[in-house]
Image (cartoon, rainbow, N blue to C red):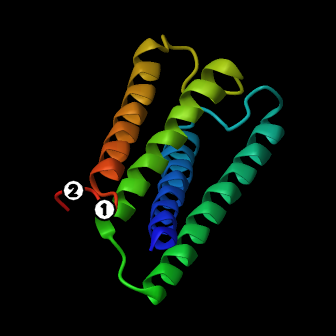
Amino acid sequence: MADQDRRTLLAGALLGAGVAASVVDLAVFHLLLHWHHFYDLSTTGVALASDGLFHAFGWFTTVGSLFLLADLRRRGPVSWTRWAAGLLTGLGAFQLVDGVVLHKVLRIHQIRYDVDLFVYDLTWTGTAALALAAGLLLVRRTRPGRPGR
């Protein structure tokens, strides 16, 4: 039972990270808005290649999470609220690591260029922190054996 619970959280977290990478970051900010590439410290060719690798990572993560979820469903009932807790946690954690580590610490890209970044950074890290906090709260509230459950 504990293994099923951990795998449920992992399936949700992997899908959350995959959605954050492939849909939120790559599709919106890289492809639709053209605000940045995954790696902006070199030529356009390197930037586009880095986007391709990032896209592959996002989809491998997404597909892997769906295989894990299918296996969980085959083994028995899935706690969808527990899975959603993992999803929010994975999405928030991915975006927070991206915003803090990749944008600010390593500086391999910024959210956008030639603008005052304060509002963008605050929005990016703020929404990531909110998603992560909501996910962790839901993880705590849905844990097996919790009194009142």
Visible in this render: residue 17? yes
Mark 2 packing: few (<14 Cα in 10 Å), some, or many (20+)? Answer: few
* Left/right of residue 44 with respect to residue 144 in the rendered view: right
Quarter occupied by the N terminus: bottom left
Describe the element under mark 1 as helix, strand or loop: loop
Residue at the spot of label 1 = 145
- Give the camera-side residue of 20 and 6: 6
Residue at the spot of label 2 = 147
**Amino acid tagged 2:** Pro
- Give the camera-side residue of 43 and 127: 127
Q: Mark 2 to mark 1: distance in Å?
A: 6 Å
Which residue sits at x=29%, y=57%? 142
Residue 27's place in the image compared with 7, above or below, is above
Query: Residue 59: where, in percent of width, then height?
Result: 62, 63
- Give the camera-side residue of 75 and 125: 75
Quarter occupied by the C terminus: bottom left
Which residue sits at x=66%, y=64%? 60
Describe the element under mark 2 as helix, strand or loop: loop
Residue 88's place in the image compared with 126, above or below, is below
**Amino acid tagged 1:** Gly
Dividing the picture into quadrants, the one containing residue 137 is top left
Which residue sits at x=76%, y=44%? 50
Mark 1 packing: few (<14 Cα in 10 Å), some, or many (20+)? Answer: few
Visible in this render: residue 110? no
